[in-house]
Image (cartoon, rainbow, N blue to C red):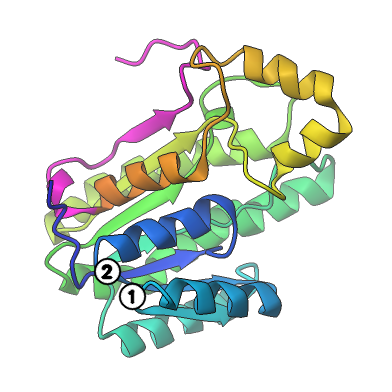
Amino acid sequence: MDLGLDGARVLVTGGTRGIGRAICEAFLAEGAAVAFCARREDEVGETQQTLTKTGGRAVGRVLDVADHAALAQWVGEMAEELGGIDVFIPNVSAGASAQGVEAWRANFEVDVLHSVLGCEAALSHLAASEQGAIVLVNTIAAVESLFAPHSYGALKAALISWGKQMAVALGPHGVRVNMVSPGPVHFPGGDWDRVRGQDPALYRSVEQRIPMGRFIRPEEVARAVVYLASPAAAMVTGTNLVIDGGMTRRVQF
């Protein structure tokens, strides 16, 4: 299937590791140009060098998305460099490991506000595109109670609600908004990789809860993101796609 992404201009936050990097790789494989950001200069440099070896156009910048003024500036600069924006993927998360007031602040500033303000900064460019699309990277912790109460799932749930509202509001402007909610994703150096080393019993117990028998791979999430962002999904908007190997038990109507 031709997804119709050849020449598309794509922005991805947090594009150096895990799901974000896999998203960049998947868009490049479809012929898109990709601009990405991350906090660590060494990781940005290595990722850009590796991605450009494939022959695609990848532009990396060092950015802390919690600096909202810098985030908006980055979006504007990348729109100018790429000649516009067709797809915006807010992927960065503060994660689920911390607890307490600071975790609530971090998840709000990073997971929620970076997504909201990044989308707002990109909106005029997306509306000018013939295939404007946003895909919010979420989590199954937003749709089902998992482990202890925490800010991560609660604020990601808020982001799903906001994404649906945005889909309705932006539809008349030709911009689609969808969400993906992955289950546990394993990749070298990621959170679940650390859990496997530090608490193998917990790792195995989570793995056993997944009917498909294993953790999700970053590229499996990335393929779903790329499809939802593509013209092949031209009439799909306001959808939250759960990618969890059957781990969640809720019935989706």
Magenta highlight on residue 137? no
* x, y percent for residue 196: 78, 32
The residue tagged 2 is: 32
* Residue 86 marker: none
- Position of 219 with respect to 123 (left or right) is right
* x, y percent for residue 140: 53, 29
Q: Secondary structure at mark 1?
A: loop
Q: Residues within 10 Å of mark 1 (few under 14, many from 20)?
A: some
In percent of the image, x 43 and y 76: which residue is there? 53
In the image, residue 169 above or below residue 79: above
- Position of 33 with respect to 233 (left or right) is right
153 or 210: which is nearer to us? Answer: 210
| Amino acid on which the number 2 mark rests in the picture | Ala
In the image, residue 75 above or below residue 29: below
Magenta highlight on residue 245? yes
Image quadrant occupied by the C terminus: top left
Q: Residues within 10 Å of mark 2 (few under 14, many from 20)?
A: many
Q: Secondary structure at mark 2?
A: loop
Disc 1 + disc 2, Cβ < 8 Å: yes
The residue tagged 1 is: 56
The overriding secondary structure of the stretch rendered in magenta is: loop
Q: Which residues are magenta?
A: 230-253
In percent of the image, x 27 and y 69: which residue is there? 32
